[in-house]
Image: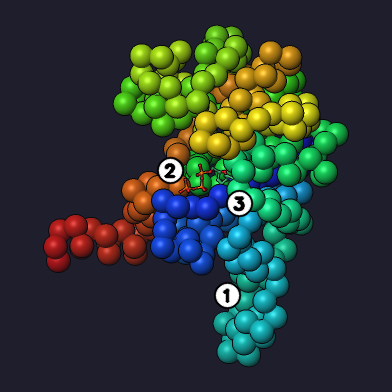
Amino acid sequence: MSVSKCLFPVAGLGTRFLPVTKELAKEMLPLVNKPIISYGVEEAISSGCNNIIMISGRAKRSIENYFDRSFELEELLKARGKMELYEEMIKISNMAEILFIRQREPLGLGHAVLCGEPVCKNEYFGVILPDDVFVSEEPVMSQLIKVHERLGGSVIALEYVEPEDVSRYGIVDSKEIEPGIHKINDMIEKPSLEKSPSRYAIMGRYVLSPLIFPILAGQNAGAGGEIQLTDALRKLAGIEPVYGVVYRGRRFDCGTQKGWLAANVALAMDNPELREVILNIVNNK
Ligand code: UTP
């Protein structure tokens, strides 16, 4: 497989979810019955990335524990004859080899990616921001890897956003070279609508060239005093090809309370039993 390693930057402070994120990692908030992080890890694995590297910070021990064995719980479930749940617990801890690297200070997404250099320095690697949860026929990371395998270079996920939303995202200046595939010329972080070069926004999935590491290492803090990944990607696009893929699928932004709530409702509506609960509440029954 051309891309076998995938970085998960999960060292952010999650301030938009305080106070719950005072103690609990944002990525451990539930989406129905599984934590947010689990959706990203499943996507990586089904895209062929069997080496998962979490860049974690404070309050992230719960993530480590979630993917680890829990002997006491397993024994209890077994003793009580709850074999289905027992099997499910074993499956989670066997899901993938997960390596944890600590980002000592939350100096920005770019810095978090740089923390993955010791493991990823010689090869193209994936990056998944688990806040962006995708529901799609083909995993979005797999859509990106296929373009990388065909065209080479780095690849980022794009979404055509509403005009009022361009100022929330990194926006690309690009040329569509095939339906749904863009060659990126430049990008700008959170522009005003007037200054925005397009309405194609960068979403939380990337296949990156290892050349990003020396660029990040030599980069000063940008907007918000953080080392920005977008700044490094701009430089990378001037040296090597960077492509954008307009992903096929549905995205939930679980980094905000509204998006997280919407994701829970939407996913619950797919489950006949839970659907009824929601409809009863909405219809005031
Ligand atoms: P966000 O911009 O969502 O920041 O980070 P955040 O801290 O997670 O959340 P808020 O804005 O305070 O509510 C985007 C991604 O980059 C990671 C985050 O964990 C998230 O996956 N990140 C950000 C790091 O790993 N380290 C950092 O220093 C900053």
Residue contact at pointers 3 and 1, CB within 8 angstroms = no
Residue 82 placement, left or right of 167: right
Which image quadrant for residue 225?
A: top right
Residue 3, position as x, y percentages in the image: 76, 36
Q: Nearer the observer, disc 3 or disc 2?
A: 3
CA–CA distance between discs 2 and 1? 27 Å
Work out how far the residue at label 3 is from the one at label 1, CA to CA, in angstroms. 30 Å
Q: Residue at x 58, y 56 (%)?
A: 38
Place of residue 187 in the rendered image (x, y in percent of width and height, measured from the top left):
55, 19
Asked if residue 119 shows in the view, the reply is yes
Q: Residue 229 appears in which quarter of the rendering?
A: top right
Q: Earlier in the sequence, mark 3 or mark 1?
A: 3
The secondary structure type at the circle numbered 3 is loop
Q: How many marks?
A: 3
Q: Is mark 3 in CB contact (under 8 Å) with mark 2? A: no
Name the amino acid, label 3.
Ala
Question: What residue is rendered at 47% in x and 61% in y?
Answer: 21
Q: Which residue is mark 2?
A: 252
- In the image, residue 285 lies at what x, y percent? 14, 66
Residue with the most extreme right position: 122
Is ligand 1 closer than 8 angstroms to the Cβ of mark 3?
A: yes
Sequence order check, earlier mark of 2 and 1: 1
Query: On residue 11, which mark appears?
Result: 3
Q: Tag 2: residue type?
A: Phe
* N-terminal-most mark, 3 or 2: 3
In the image, farthest residue toward the bottom: 79
Name the quadrant containing residue 57: bottom right
For residue 140, above or below residue 179: below
Q: Which mark is residue 85?
A: 1
